């Protein structure tokens, strides 16, 4: 099944956003947009409309005076005023006709959301490579650095997504956390993870395990150690939760075991978690693939 065509092209690496118009009391589409997106002023919407950057699903421009029509889809360009540039650069490790492999720095989201748009890995790569069809095949937390794969061709995207959904890719992470000489290494952590009361956190709960992580020690220095983490499953924050539950909170983690304020980033203290390498059989070419991050964590006592 083909996806709905978008009546606006990609602009500066950003594809158009879409909103569906429900039945409601709004007199104009502009009134709906102002109410639906309170963080965006009426003046900003008017400027976007005057620039031809708000259209309906048929490509017809939306003007400030245009009457409200329920059950239409509107397309527009999302923008963030005064978005600061992240002082880190991504590295493209590999590119062929089907995939792009990038080495993501700490603090950079993979996709737009919240207060990040231009300073996301996806948008940066679209601008750098000029590939509007680029789509991430999997995700990393904003705070985590390392390997991220992107699909180029919509026609071959499914097989690459299947590598992750069917768990045929082997992922290798590294983390710096307190050294626990009292524990038997290597070990495996299995538990059931569910969303916590705060949307940012996950928690372990009783029940059938839905996560599994294998952990071993690579190096010990003082009261810290460099650990190898091999997730068998891929739940949100799985590695961070498992490490914290074992008494091994990852250095500079602002979510586990304690949640800090959203503006607590310190670029001098990145989360010491790295998606170091990934291995899989290319589902399109049949080649054995292995990609390794050029980054290294800071093991300091």
Image (cartoon, grey):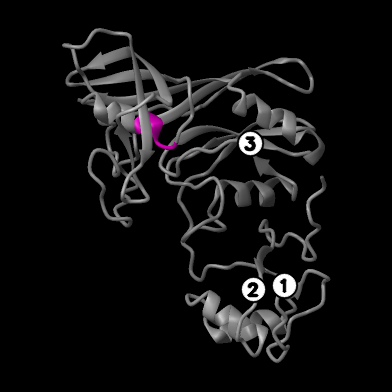
Q: Is residue 12 above or below residue 144?
A: below
Q: Depth-wise, is mark 3 or mark 1 nearer the camera?
A: 1
Kindly check if marks 2 and 3 are in contact, taking CB atoms under 8 A apart as contact.
no
Q: Which residue is mark 3?
A: 137
Whether residue 94 appears in this view of the structure is: no
Q: Quadrant of the N terminus?
A: top right
Secondary structure of residue under mark 2:
loop
Left or right of 8 in this view: 290:
left
Q: Main secondary structure of the magenta part?
A: helix
Q: Which residue is mark 2?
A: 22
Q: Earlier in the sequence, mark 3 or mark 1?
A: 1
Q: Which residue is mark 1?
A: 71
In the rendering, at what x and y percent does residue 84 appear?
Answer: 46, 61
Q: Which residues are magenta?
A: 236-240
From the viewer's side, name the closer residue of 290 and 70.
70
Q: Residue furthest front?
A: 207
Q: Residue at x 32, y 9 (%)?
A: 186
**Residue 285 covered by magenta stretch:** no
């Amino acid at each position: 099944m083909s996806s709905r065509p978008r009546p606006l092209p990609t602009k500066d690496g950003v594809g158009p956003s879409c909103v569906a118009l429900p039945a409601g009391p709004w007199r104009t589409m502009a009134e709906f947009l102002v109410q639906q997106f309170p963080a965006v002023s009426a003046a900003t919407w008017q400027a976007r409309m005057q620039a031809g950057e708000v259209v309906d699903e048929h490509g017809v421009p939306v003007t400030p005076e245009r009457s409200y029509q329920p059950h239409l889809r509107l397309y527009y360009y999302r923008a963030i005023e005064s978005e600061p540039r992240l002082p880190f650069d991504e590295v493209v490790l590999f590119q062929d006709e089907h995939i792009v492999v990038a080495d993501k720095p700490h603090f950079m989201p993979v996709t737009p959301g919240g207060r990040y748009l231009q300073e996301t890995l996806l948008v940066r790569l679209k601008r750098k490579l000029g590939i509007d069809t680029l789509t991430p095949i999997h995700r990393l937390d904003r705070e985590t650095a390392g390997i991220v794969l992107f699909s180029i061709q919509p026609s071959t995207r499914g097989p690459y997504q299947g590598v992750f959904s069917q768990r045929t890719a082997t992922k290798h992470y590294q983390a710096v956390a307190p050294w626990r000489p009292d524990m038997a290494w290597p070990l495996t952590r299995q538990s059931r993870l569910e969303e916590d009361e705060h949307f940012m956190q996950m928690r372990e709960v009783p029940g059938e395990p839905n996560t599994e992580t294998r952990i071993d020690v690579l190096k010990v220095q003082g009261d810290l150690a460099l650990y190898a983490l091999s997730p068998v499953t891929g739940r949100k924050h799985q590695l961070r939760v498992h490490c914290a539950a074992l008494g091994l909170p990852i250095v500079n983690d602002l979510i586990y075991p304690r949640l800090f304020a959203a503006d607590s980033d310190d670029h001098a203290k990145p989360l010491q978690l790295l998606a170091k390498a990934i291995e899989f059989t290319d589902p399109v070419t049949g080649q054995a693939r292995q990609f390794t991050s050029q980054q290294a964590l800071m093991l300091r006592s």
